[in-house]
């Protein structure tokens, strides 16, 4: 008996290009990268903001309500995240957050890296405190 094929949604070349350029895909997921303005919207809408900077960076200032798990401890993040909520991953510039978001996506989370990091978050109007 041959296995039953599973249905995989067909994505247009526009969907793929939008995802590559950091736009949000049409399937409802965040995509791999997210711009700060959009990140603010989805966090206000219930997404979790995950800050993967080091402890000293976190202590110098962070977004209120963010969950802190340093990149070196990213395997502990799923225990700190709420199931069913998308995750916006933040770091200082967007480099570490890409690594963390990719790891979380492999684990089944809808996770996107915040392009431009905490600086972009601030410029878009996101608050940062201690």
Image (cartoon, rainbow, N blue to C red):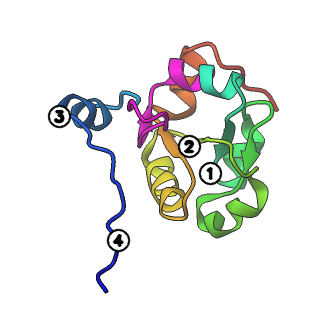
Residue 50 screen position, x and y as percent? 66, 45
Residue 115 screen position, x and y as percent? 44, 33
Of residues 21 and 46, the one nearer the viewer is: 46
Q: Which of the two marks, 4 or 1, is nearer to us in this view?
A: 4
Q: Is residue 93 left or right of residue 84?
A: left
Q: Which mark is residue 91?
A: 2
Q: Which residue is mark 3?
A: 13
Q: Residues within 10 Å of mark 2 (few under 14, many from 20)?
A: many
> N-terminal of the two: label 2 or label 3?
3
> N-terminal of the two: label 4 or label 2?
4
Q: Regarding mark 3 in the picture, which secondary structure is present there?
A: helix
- Circles 2 and 1: CB atoms closer than 8 Å: yes
Vertical side of 56 occupied by 120: above or below: above
Q: How many angstroms separate mark 4 from mark 3 (CA)?
A: 27 Å
Q: Which mark is residue 52?
A: 1
Vertical side of 33 occupied by 103: above or below: below
> N-terminal of the two: label 1 or label 3?
3
- Report the span colored magenta: 25-40
In the rendered image, which quarter is residue 75 located in? bottom right
Q: Is residue 39 left or right of residue 95?
A: right
């Amino acid at each position: 008996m041959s296995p039953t094929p599973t249905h995989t949604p067909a994505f247009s070349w526009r969907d793929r290009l939008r995802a590559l350029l950091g736009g949000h895909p049409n399937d409802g997921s965040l995509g791999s990268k997210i711009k700060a303005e959009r990140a603010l919207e989805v966090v206000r809408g219930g997404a979790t903001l995950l800050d993967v900077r080091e402890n000293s960076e976190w202590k110098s200032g962070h977004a209120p309500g963010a969950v802190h798990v340093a990149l070196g401890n990213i395997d502990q993040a799923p225990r700190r995240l709420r199931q069913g909520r998308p995750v916006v991953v933040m770091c200082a510039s967007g480099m570490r957050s890409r690594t963390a978001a990719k790891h979380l996506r492999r684990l089944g989370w809808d996770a996107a890296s915040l392009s431009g990091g905490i600086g972009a978050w601030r410029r878009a109007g996101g608050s940062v405190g201690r």
